[in-house]
Amino acid sequence: MPYELFEVDKEIPDRKNHTYVKDSSDPTEEIPKCNTKTIPGCMTERGCAFAGVKGVITGAVKDVVHVVHSPVGCTTYGCGSKRYPTSPYLPNGDKIPVEQFNLKYIMGTDLKESDVVFGGMKKLRKSILEAAKEFPFVNAIYTYATCTTGLIGDDLDAVAKELSEEIGIDVVAFNAPGFSGPTQSKGHHVGNFTLFNKLVGTKEPPETTPYDVNLIGEYNIDGDLWVLQKYFEEIGINILSKFTGDCSHDEICWMHRAKLSIVRCQRSATYIADLIEEKYNIPYIKVDFFGPKYCSENLMAVAKHFGLEENAQKLIHREMAKIQPKLDFYREKLEGKKLWVFSGGPKNWHLPEPLKEHLGMETVVVSTMFEHQDGYEKIKQRVGEGTVIVDDPNSLELEEIIEVYKPDIILSGIKEKYIAHKLGVPCVLIHSYENGPYIGFEGFLNLAQDIYASIYNPVWNMLEFEETIKDKEEHLDETCNISDETGTNIPKAKTEEEVV
């Protein structure tokens, strides 16, 4: 069978269906079980639906203030931890008076027990009015249901509608309480549908051109958007609306005026591209700009739509000439190194082929927290024979994967980084990046440099010991092999020599 049960999962055999080892002779539908609730007993790395809508979709919008309707913990959790930098300028020429406003501020209703018993809508209303008074320069207020307010049934839409008329700016409610789906992916879905249904088509852009595009699913992590924006401007393509990196509220409202939608993150944002195509007959193409080859191919595809292939070709030749000598150096240093790619979604199938083709690295494990069936089919298509593909890995599996498959480096998020470091394995952040941007030609060079610097960091030669799972089991046997009268294991008493 192509599925594998980790040693640490012997007590939860259902985990076997979530770990698939690629075998090209298998039918296409042989993939890990996915997009289901985490199996009880697993210490999952996943985020919740609220994290999906606020942390991914709306957190990058730069001229709105966010009011989280929750106890204070969810509000704190919703404060920006990703690198979504923004420029202070809006399409109409106005300037936001607070630099990186979207990363610095969040507001909450701070629900208490009495609010849960008697309802929190009055408190939500008061908090939104306070937000409008405190930040009069914002162009909209977004408010979010969380697990608590979802359970007590507060009607956020009613409050938002009433206050939109009273304040005179858009107040938008997002109903994605944490429990509403198995993963943060549910929040992506709710965010896309809410923004489309309540905003798209409600305003007109100041001007349009025949070369206008919506750049969808690009969140400007560590400046990715600005790399692509520079490329498109040189080719002659105008980004009319961004969804949602370095995005203003109004840009979402006029997405219906673009001539083409370009979808970057195909897990979190294809929904709104589908909706725009269906209602406004605007086509979309899915693109991938990680790695020189994919970047070249996809720039050409977008340029071809507008008849601008010659401009794209010039840019590609120039950028490749710039980076090739350095790429040759990193390939010499990294060829044959094994890596584990652990991202939320599409980077699992964006990165393995460029890292193989341009740097000679072998992906031995791929894992994701919220991928769906179509994503796993793409991952399976792009990774090599024998690659282990894991859905929703738990923390103990992380340790076993490191011990068994011995990756030279892990590309993952902050939650996994320090587990990897404690086990003596370097890790590069690919959710929020180390020294990005990582997209485009120069971005891939940045990624290669960070991988090289991490693997060849001399700190790894200073480790004095390496504890294995087998060592831990033996240690457990030695210290817990005596039981008291209730059957509870107690540690062995130390000998006199051990005490000394």
Image: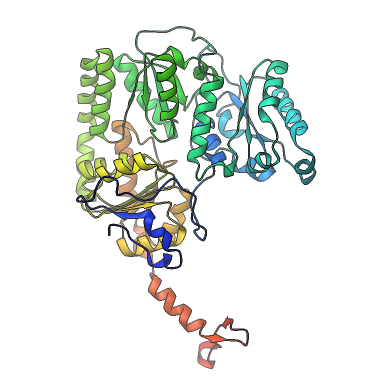
Quadrant in the picture for the N terminus: bottom left
- Residue at x 49%, y 28% (from the top left corner): 192
- Residue at x 51%, y 9% (from the top left corner): 204
Horizontal relation, residue 491 to residue 164: left or right = left
Horizontal relation, residue 142 to residue 163: left or right = left
Dividing the picture into quadrants, the one containing residue 267 is top left
Q: Work out whether residue 345 or residue 355 is closer to the camera in this orientation and state it.
A: 345
Residue 414 pos. (x, y %)? 47, 49
Determine the residue located farthest toward the bottom in the rendered image.
Answer: 496
- Residue at x 26%, y 52% (from the top left corner): 22
Residue 326 pos. (x, y %)? 23, 39
How is the rendered protein coloured? rainbow
Residue 415 pos. (x, y %)? 48, 51
Q: Work out whether residue 385 or residue 227 is closer to the camera in this orientation and state it.
A: 385
Above or below, 479 relative to 330: below
Q: Is residue 448 at least partly visible in the picture?
A: no
Above or below, 71 relative to 103: below
- Residue at x 36%, y 60% (from the top left corner): 401
Above or below, 260 relative to 48: above
Q: Work out whether residue 329 or residue 33 is closer to the camera in this orientation and state it.
A: 33
Residue 329 pos. (x, y %)? 21, 44
Dividing the picture into quadrants, the one containing residue 355 is top left
Q: Is residue 497 at least partly visible in the picture?
A: yes
How many numbered discs, if any? 0
Horizontal relation, residue 40 to residue 365: left or right = right
